[in-house]
């Protein structure tokens, strides 16, 4: 099984960025954990701070991968372009958030990604990614 993890803006700073919200661990360390725990899964990882690059990546993996784990970060709340990209591909997308966006500012309650995604996992810290992996494993044929 091939899974693509796509992280949006400022998620390259995980571990340093607002640790009270996002924790002290870098995503690289967590990705290593995922790769070791699910050694049979082929993980591709992409992070960008640029909206168009995220759209390009969704298009790139969106017809050949078995699943996409997308944390579009701040673009979640603004990007019709990313939503349209998800609608254009055949690979199912699970929307991920580390923090519970619904317990934060009102502008984080709106997601352009949720209506076009298979599902949404929010608020479990980095474990949100692992729960999405488990869901893709369960549904993998
Ligand atoms: C986030 C939540 C977003 O509102 C925020 O802009 C982020 C991270 C999360 O994973 O909790 O950058 O997507």
Image: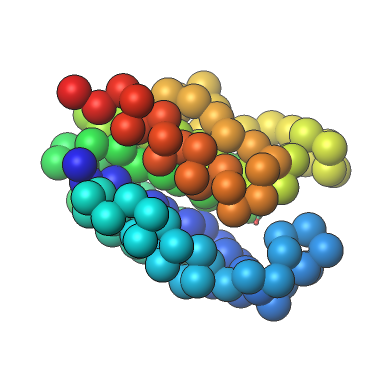
Above or below, 67 against 117 in this view is below
Q: Is residue 61 visible?
A: no
**Closer to us: 125 or 65:** 125
Residue at the (35%, 60%) spot, across then down: 35
The number of numbered badges drawn on the structure is: 0
Residue 68 coordinates in the image, percent (x, y): 35, 42
Residue at the (20%, 42%) spot, across then down: 1
Which quarter of the rendering shows the C terminus? top left
Residue 89 coordinates in the image, percent (x, y): 25, 33
**Closer to us: 78 or 138:** 138
* Side of 105 relative to 54 (left or right): right
Most extreme residue toward the left is: 64
Place residue 25 in its image quadrant.
bottom right
Residue at the (29%, 46%) spot, across then down: 3
Above or below, 26 against 101 in this view is below
Above or below, 8 against 65 in this view is below
Residue 51 coordinates in the image, percent (x, y): 46, 57
């Amino acid at each position: 099984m091939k899974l693509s993890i796509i992280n949006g803006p400022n998620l390259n700073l995980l571990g340093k960025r607002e640790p009270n919200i996002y924790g002290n661990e870098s995503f690289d360390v967590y990705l290593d954990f995922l790769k070791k725990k699910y050694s049979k899964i082929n993980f591709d990882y992409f992070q960008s701070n640029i909206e168009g690059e995220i759209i390009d990546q969704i298009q790139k993996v969106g017809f050949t991968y078995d699943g996409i784990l997308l944390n579009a970060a701040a673009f979640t709340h603004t990007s019709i372009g990313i939503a349209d990209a998800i609608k254009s591909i055949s690979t199912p997308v699970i929307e991920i958030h580390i923090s519970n966006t619904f317990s934060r500012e009102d502008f984080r309650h709106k997601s352009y990604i949720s209506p076009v995604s298979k599902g949404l996992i929010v608020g479990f810290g980095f474990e949100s990614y692992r729960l999405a992996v488990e869901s893709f494993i369960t549904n993998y044929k």
